[in-house]
Amino acid sequence: MSIEKLETFLNIATEAAIAGGSKLMSYWGNLQDIQEKGSPGNLVTEADKAAEEAILKILQRYLPDHGILSEEAGKLGNITSRYLWAIDPLDGTTNFAHQYPFAASSVGLLIDGVPQVGAVFNPILDELFLAAKGLGATCNQKPISVSQTTTLQKSLVITGFAYDRRETTDNNYQEFCQMCHLTQGVRRSGSAALDLSSIAYGRADGYWERGLSPWDVVAGIVILEEAGGKVTAYNSSPFDLKSGKILATNGKIHDLMSKALIETPPLAYWDTANRLN
Ligand code: IPD
Ligand code: CA
Ligand code: CA
């Protein structure tokens, strides 16, 4: 892939993410239509749909022969194309509905199944994260890179809980206890795209989560990898988009975090007697 072509795709992703984020802002603090879809607590609002329409309009205008996988609209265009856009028009819908200012439009491009372009825009805090493979990562046009933290004891880590958490025992509660115990702190920020971008920026050192979809992570993965970070499965094997389980770090705590996640004890372990050992 030529640099010129990647730059062109990055420019289109940028325009689309800004258009989506700007549309979100017109609903900020003014949401009338909030509905649940699928699992309890999984919200969709008029802002999700309007931002999606704005993003799709741009992608379809410039790249009518590409495929698109967008959270609300589903599969569109030529989905057998080697170019597949993964779109989350509003990542952080729960935050947005509560006016918690951590939400973004996320526009990512997979080329031959590999994340290669990412644009994540939080219009509330006015932060635009961009990256393309081999071209580095930026926030508001300034280069960003991951933290230098090398131990879990000194790490701030981030996670999230999927909407099906009440329906499965694989709900991340065990892992959450383990990481609370081993690190300086655990945050649940509510936007996977911004969580990955936060690791890229060096604001936190590691991130793990299960139950994610391609639109949650494709853009953020490119941003993090281009900022010097590492993305794998929990056990450090190559990340599989279909698995929905991601371990993403500054690279330096990757093996430690992987080990901690793999060796997570059952919840009963955190009963007082064990915890005080
Ligand atoms: C959600 C957010 C959240 C994560 C959930 C996602 P949505 O996306 O990224 O941080 O924990 O698993 O589904 O629903 O706000 O687009
Ligand atoms: Ca999402
Ligand atoms: Ca969403």
Image (spheres, rainbow, N blue to C red):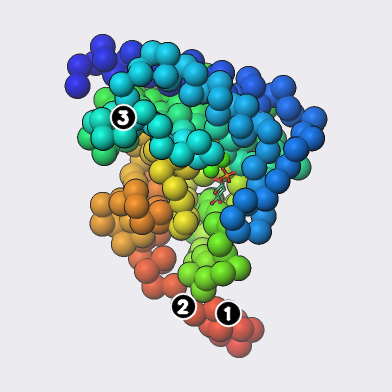
Work out whether mark 1 precedes mark 3 in sequence or the reverse, and give the earlier one: 3
Residue 184 in picture, x, y percent from top left = 56, 56
Depicted 266 relative to depicted 171: above or below: below
Mark before the other along the chain sequence, 2 or 3: 3
The residue indicated by pointer 1 is: 270
Task: Give the camera-side residue of 150 and 206.
Answer: 206
- Which residue type carries mark 1? Trp
Q: Amino acid at mark 3?
A: Asn
Residue count near mark 2 (Cα–Cα under 10 Å), binned few <14, some 14–19, many ≥20 = some
Query: Which residue is labeled 2 in the image?
Result: 265
Q: Which residue is mark 3?
A: 78
Residue 195 can be seen, yes or no: no
Identity of the residue drawn at 40% across and 54% down: 244
Which quadrant holds the C terminus? bottom right
Asked whether 65 or 105 is in front, the reply is 65
| Image position of 112 (left or right of 274) | left
Report if the CB atoms under discs 1 and 3 are less than 8 Å apart: no
Q: Amino acid at mark 2?
A: Pro
Q: Is residue 32 visible?
A: yes
Tell me the distance, in whole angstroms, between the alpha carbons under discs 1 and 2.
8 Å
- From mark 1 to mark 3, how far is it between C-alphas? 50 Å
Residue 86: % across, % down: 41, 35
Residue at 75 percent of width and 38 percent of height: 33
